[in-house]
Image (cartoon, rainbow, N blue to C red):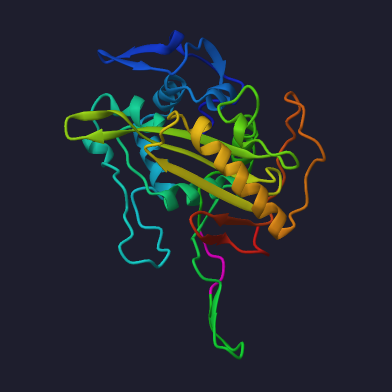
């Protein structure tokens, strides 16, 4: 979005070990030189860190805020948390390499939904809506909520390119093959967050997640699945992705969403994204981020 890098640019992921400011940052696998799409597809911590270094602290901090992190979403629920986002003035020397891959920051699930839907919605951050309307038993409507755009976070072109990369995640070569749907193209991202304790990260304790939307080129639904300390594995692609697929299949059938392909797409065919007519969300309960009729 800033023109600092292009999706065709490559970064050396250092074989899975990146020394910065005297500290080693590791990847879950040994990766070499990869383009940005592959960094996202493979979920490379080192690649994300190097992209963060290119962007710089001030701009990274501003985009984190613009996507809605560190602030209430104003969904209208009491007790909503804001997560943890330290002011850039208080970042240590490692933060620029750790925050881009998820350490040193804490977010809520609804913030993540809001941010992912902004990418699906052509870069438009929408205020989440819990209720469409309030009406009496006779159907008289007393309150109706309408879609409200908070801000344009990134350009439509940048959003399309990001979706292009996110479509590679639920494929055989990505981290979330188990999220792949038979009749819909999914765009999404895995998350594997080691829990923090009083004296560092807790051994064997994780939050594992997958968040995605479909059909990727004209999204209707965004679904977030987060598991607290899963037992059989801890990577989001192993644990949360299958639940995403199970939920998504049932939601697609219930809402009669038109398939965007009849068979599973070939791995080397990734169509470009189109304008987004609407994006709804489903989490623990249905939560409309962007009702029908709004781009």
Quick check: 63 above or below 130? above
Find the residue positioned furthest to the right.
Answer: 262
Quick check: 281 above or below 2? below
Q: Is residue 77 visible?
A: yes
Residue 254 x %, y %: 69, 59
Residue 7 relative to residue 74: left or right:
right
Quick check: 154 above or below 282? above
Q: Nearer the viewer, residue 111 or 248?
A: 248
Residue 93 relative to residue 151: left or right:
left
Q: Residue at x 34, y 17 (%)?
A: 25
Q: Nearer the viewer, residue 256 or 102?
A: 256
Quick check: 96 above or below 59? above
Q: Residue at x 37, y 13 (%)?
A: 18
In terms of secondary structure, what is the magenta stretch mainly?
loop
106 magenta-colored: no
Find the residue positioned furthest to the bottom.
Answer: 138
Q: The C terminus lies in which quarter of the figure? A: bottom right
Q: Nearer the viewer, residue 79 or 40?
A: 79
Q: Is residue 155 visible?
A: no
148 magenta-colored: yes
Find the residue positioned furthest to the front.
Answer: 231
Residue 3 x %, y %: 54, 31
Q: Residue at x 78, y 44 (%)?
A: 260
Q: Which residues are magenta?
A: 145-149
Residue 288 x %, y %: 55, 62
Q: Nearer the viewer, residue 86 or 57?
A: 86
Count of all numbered marks drawn on residues in the image: 0
Residue 115 x %, y %: 49, 47
Q: The N terminus lies in which quarter of the figure? A: top right
């Amino acid at each position: 979005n800033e023109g600092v890098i292009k999706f065709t640019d490559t970064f050396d992921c250092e074989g899975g070990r990146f020394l910065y400011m005297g500290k080693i940052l590791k990847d879950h696998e040994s990766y070499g030189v990869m383009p940005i799409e592959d960094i996202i597809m493979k979920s490379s911590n080192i690649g994300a860190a190097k992209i963060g270094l290119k962007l710089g602290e001030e701009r990274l901090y501003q985009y984190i805020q613009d996507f809605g992190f560190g602030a209430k979403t104003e969904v209208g629920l009491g007790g909503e948390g804001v997560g943890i986002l330290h002011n850039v003035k208080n970042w240590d020397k490692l933060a620029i390499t750790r925050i881009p891959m998820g350490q040193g920051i804490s977010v809520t699930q609804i913030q993540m939904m809001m941010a992912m839907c902004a990418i699906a919605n052509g870069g438009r951050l929408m205020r989440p809506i819990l209720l469409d309307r309030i009406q009496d038993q006779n159907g008289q409507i007393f309150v109706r909520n309408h879609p409200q755009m908070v801000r344009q976070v990134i350009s439509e072109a940048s959003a399309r390119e990001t979706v292009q990369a996110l479509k590679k995640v639920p494929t055989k070569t990505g981290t979330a093959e188990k999220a792949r749907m038979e009749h819909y193209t999914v765009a999404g991202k895995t998350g594997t967050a080691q829990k923090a304790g009083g004296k560092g990260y807790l051994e064997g304790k994780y939050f594992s997640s997958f968040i995605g939307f479909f059909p990727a080129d004209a999204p209707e639904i965004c679904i977030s699945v987060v598991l607290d300390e899963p037992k059989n594995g801890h990577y989001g692609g192993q644990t949360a992705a299958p639940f995403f697929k199970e939920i998504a299949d049932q939601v697609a059938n219930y809402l009669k969403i038109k398939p965007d392909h009849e068979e599973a797409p070939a791995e080397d065919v990734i169509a470009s994204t189109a304008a987004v007519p609407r994006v709804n969300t489903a989490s623990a309960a249905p939560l409309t981020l962007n009702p029908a009729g709004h781009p």
